[in-house]
Image (cartoon, rainbow, N blue to C red):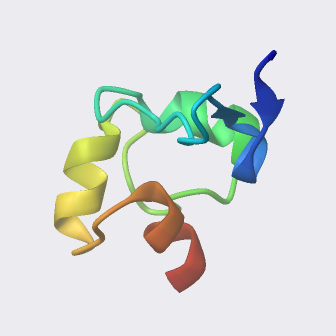
């Protein structure tokens, strides 16, 4: 069985788990996917894990829901 598209253009693995973005992903990379407004007011060279800590978000999904 091949990978299927999951939430937010992530991949759903064969066993059903959705592949998560790495905490080392840069904000500028995420802006390419989610638009220039993503993490407005934050540096583009900030890592996702730092952004999540600063905004008290447990995951990218939670961050997106709050914004």
- Observer-nearest of 37 and 57: 57
Residue at image point 67% right, 35% down: 12
Q: Is residue 60 left or right of residue 53?
A: right
Q: Is residue 9 left or right of residue 47?
A: right
| Residue found at the very far bottom of the displayed protein | 66
Instruction: Say how many tags the image has.
Output: 0
Asked which quadrant contains residue 15, the reply is: top right
Q: Could you say where residue 8 lies in the image, as x and y percent from the top left?
A: 73, 50
Q: Could you say where residue 52 lies in the image, as x and y percent from the top left?
A: 28, 59
Residue at image point 76% right, 22% down: 3
- Observer-nearest of 32 and 57: 57
Residue at image point 30% right, 71% down: 57
Residue at image point 60% right, 56% down: 38
Q: Could you say where residue 56 lies in the image, as x and y percent from the top left?
A: 22, 75
Residue 24 visible: yes
Residue 7 higher or lower than 20, as above or below: below
Residue 9 higher or lower than 42, as above or below: above
Residue 67 visible: no
Looking at the figure, which quarter contains the C terminus? Answer: bottom right
Q: Could you say where residue 53 lies in the image, as x and y percent from the top left?
A: 17, 61
Looking at the figure, which quarter contains the N terminus? Answer: top right
Q: Is residue 14 left or right of residue 39?
A: right
Q: Is residue 50 left or right of residue 32?
A: left
- Observer-nearest of 1 and 46: 1
């Amino acid at each position: 069985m091949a990978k299927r598209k999951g939430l937010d253009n992530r991949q759903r693995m064969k066993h059903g788990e959705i592949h998560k973005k790495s905490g080392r992903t840069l904000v500028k990379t995420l802006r390419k996917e989610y638009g220039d407004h993503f993490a407005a007011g934050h540096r583009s060279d900030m890592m996702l894990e730092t952004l999540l800590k600063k905004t008290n978000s447990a995951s990218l999904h939670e961050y997106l829901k709050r914004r």
